[in-house]
Amino acid sequence: MKKMNHVFASAVFAVAILLAGSKTFAQTKEVAGDSKAVRLGIGFSAGLPTNDAFNIALGGDLKLQKDFFSNISGTLSAGYTNFSVKNDGGSIGYIPVKAGIKIFPVERFYISGEVGAGFGTDKGQGTALVYAPGIGVGFNKGIDLGLRYEGFAQNGSNLGQVALRIAYGFKL
């Protein structure tokens, strides 16, 4: 499973790099030329953990997005993710803080990649490296629907999830 996660992350990264160098289109029809817009998104995520010891992962986040060009945006996000443990009914939580990039190869469709730190909320949990390649669709009314793999790598182990994120973005 660990090898598959690295292969998936590498493939998404390679596609993103290839598409960044190719001809791309604007995020929305309203944008003429390069946009310099800034947006704040509020999102909810539900995920399926890749580790059998967990049932479900739920979380929320705030994401700031700055357009660099009409087809490339930078992101900063912070939130909370909770992994529910199967057998004992407990859970573990992280506060992921990430920076990333969104590339729009065609109108409204994006490929994204984020990296950062996940601060454990439980005693002795520590900090994990967080990485999250994904894809999604941004709608003109502010709705963002994304699918991502999010991995938390710490002390040689990897806890991950395949998550669906539904968000609403406000133009600042």
Image (spheres, rainbow, N blue to C red):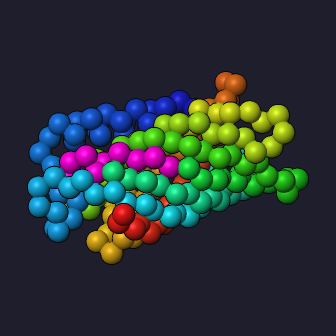
Which span is picked out in magenta?
Answer: 67-77
- x, y percent for residue 79: 59, 53
| Coordinates of residue 80 in the picture (x, y in percent) | 64, 53
Residue 68 within the magenta-colored segment of the rendering: yes
Residue 17 in the magenta stretch? The answer is: no
Q: Residue at x 59, y 36 (%)?
A: 117
Residue under the point 37% across and 60% down: 39
Q: Nearer the viewer, residue 160 or 104?
A: 104
Q: Is residue 13 left or right of residue 49?
A: left
Looking at this view, name the residue that lies furthest to the front. 172
**Residue reaching furthest to the top:** 156
Residue 142 found in image quarter: bottom left
Please determine whether, in this image, residue 63 is positioned above or below residue 43: above
Q: Is residue 18 visible?
A: yes
**Where 9 sits versus 104, above or below?**
above
Q: What residue is at 45 percent from the left and 62 percent from the top? A: 41
